[in-house]
Image (cartoon, rainbow, N blue to C red):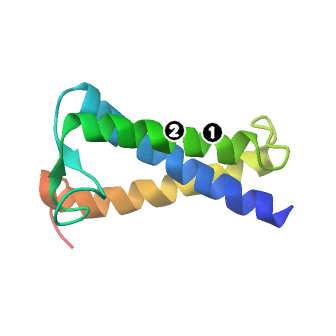
Amino acid sequence: MAGSYVAWFFGGVFLANAVPHFVSGVRGEPFQSPFAKPRGVGLSSSTVNVVWGFFNLVVGYALLCHVGDFDLRNTVDAVAPGLGILAIGLFGARHFGRFHGGRLTD
């Protein structure tokens, strides 16, 4: 059961990571991705970001819906992906904030 919670945590990470990439891509805007140079700092095309966002969505879905018996209505189950969403959200705010003006101080 503990392995399911770890998978669900990372499911939340992947689902949250899908959002900025997919949204930037469908808006036709470049955004940082692991495929840019330098990695995670340079910009990737909108097409690359749509594909990367979709991939993250598929992996997040697989981790939540095909590992263990995830029940979104069960608060204990929902905490694991929620913490994953929070963790990647805070990381993204700090990391990408320095490029997009969202981080005013360290």
SS class, disc 1? helix
Q: Is residue 39 left or right of residue 56?
A: left
Q: Quadrant of residue 98?
A: bottom left
**Residue 73 drawn at (x, y percent):** 79, 34
Label 2 packing within 10 angstroms: few (<14), some (14-19), many (20+): many
Q: Are marks 2 and 1 in contact (CB under 8 Å)?
A: yes
**Residue 26 drawn at (x, y percent):** 27, 26
**Residue 86 drawn at (x, y percent):** 50, 54
Residue 68 in sight in this render: yes
The residue type indicated by label 1 comes to Tyr
Farthest residue toward the bottom? Answer: 106
Residue at the location (66% across, 42% down)? 62
Which quadrant of the rendered structure holds the C terminus? bottom left
Residue at the location (18% across, 40% down)? 45
On the image, numbered disc 1 is attached to which residue? 61
Which quadrant of the rendered structure holds the N terminus? bottom right
Task: Report the Cα–Cα distance between label 2 and label 1.
Answer: 6 Å
